[in-house]
Amino acid sequence: MVRFIRAFAALFIACCAVAASAATPPTPPEPACQRACLEGWVDKYLAAMRDRNVDPALFARDVKFTENGVRLPLGKEGLWYAMSGIGTYKFYVPDIETQQVAFIGTVVEKSGSSATGPATDTLVAIALRLRIRNDRITEVEQLAIRPGSTNSSNNMFPPTGEGVEAMKAPAAIFGQPIPMDKQASRAELIRTANYYFAGLQDNDGKGYYPFTDDCIRFENGVDVLANLLDPATGKRGRMTCKYQFETTLKGVVSRVRDRRFVAVDRERGIVFSFAFFDHYNINWTWQLGELFRIEDGKIRRIEAVFLRGPFGINSGWSTYEQGMSDEIQDIR
């Protein structure tokens, strides 16, 4: 009898343990690729492009590749044709949740033709997104902003590759982690970044502009707020992001469309997006990669690289309807 009671008690305890383990959801495993790993994929991709090496150990068989919105075969065209080196400016935006990584940087391309003479090394700015699945690159989306690209409304900026390279490294603020208790959710970060696009589109100077007082914006390597003319005083000086939206950026951009938020780094409060700025009155489209540092629900720092594209161009990743929409697209 005693032996039977002991056996029954042991069985009861085991059943309780099984029930308890079933009631407690297992801890989800961490994604295989963390920050350093995702950044490493960018380095491997750039080296492969320089070496024109479509390594099956690096790329999925059905990898999709676009450059400046045009789908191309991987390995022989676009930057892959004549890239000869990797620049020094490197800004990584790893998205651990989605296993994607975005990047702004510089590369070197051999540039020349029968009209311009022998090929010479030129700096090219690049905005990049990679998707990683099953330890392979499955998607490559890149913008290549070459010296001949129109890069400002009056083409008064230096060549974009040179401007970005002159920055040397991302500003220190981008590398500072957001305290854990102040880290925003993915959706909150994207929503705040989208206020920039929403405020710029058909802007009347009366929108919601969540910028910090010390917000700085770089475009194609240029600090565009450093020496602006204040219409109220007639004097030049540094202008705040918010004041510029309220005064001098009114009615400039007709539409901001295909707002694709492709990488979110919650630890550092950074959101990376691809989008298009359309100007109806001059039949003009800017194709851009832009990133935002967000703190306490406000945008503190902005960096963008862009080039002029054919009016109404699609990203190569969106349907026609998505490409014409101004709605948020969270790319996962």
Image (cartoon, rainbow, N blue to C red):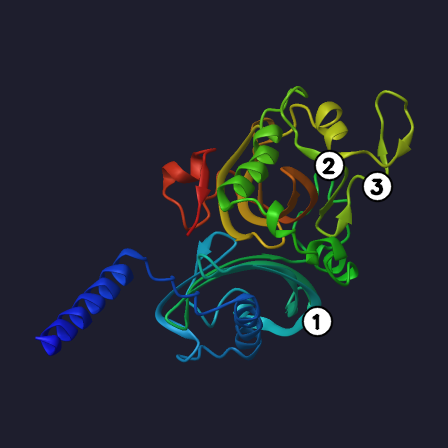
Q: Residue at x 84, y 23 (%)?
A: 231
As displayed, is residue 325 above or below residue 60?
A: above
**Of marks 3 and 1, the one in the foreground:** 3
Residue placed farthest to the front in the image?
1
**Sequence order check: which comes first, mark 3 or mark 1?**
1
- Element on which disc 3 rests: loop
Q: Is residue 37 above or below residue 139?
A: below
Q: Amino acid at mark 2?
A: Thr
Query: 125 or 111: which is nearer to us?
Result: 125
Q: Amino acid at mark 1?
A: Asp
**Residue linked to disc 3:** 226
> Sequence-wise, which precedes: disc 2 or disc 3?
2
User: Which residue is at a point 44% across and 65% down the rendered structure image?
Assistant: 30
Callout in the foreground (2, 3): 2
Disc 2 target residue: 212
Crowd around label 2: few <14 · some 14–19 · many ≥20 (10 Å): some
Q: Position of residue 128 (x, y in %)?
A: 55, 59
* Quadrant location, the N terminus: bottom left
**Residue 300 location (% of width, % of height):** 71, 42
Query: Does residue 72 show up?
Result: yes
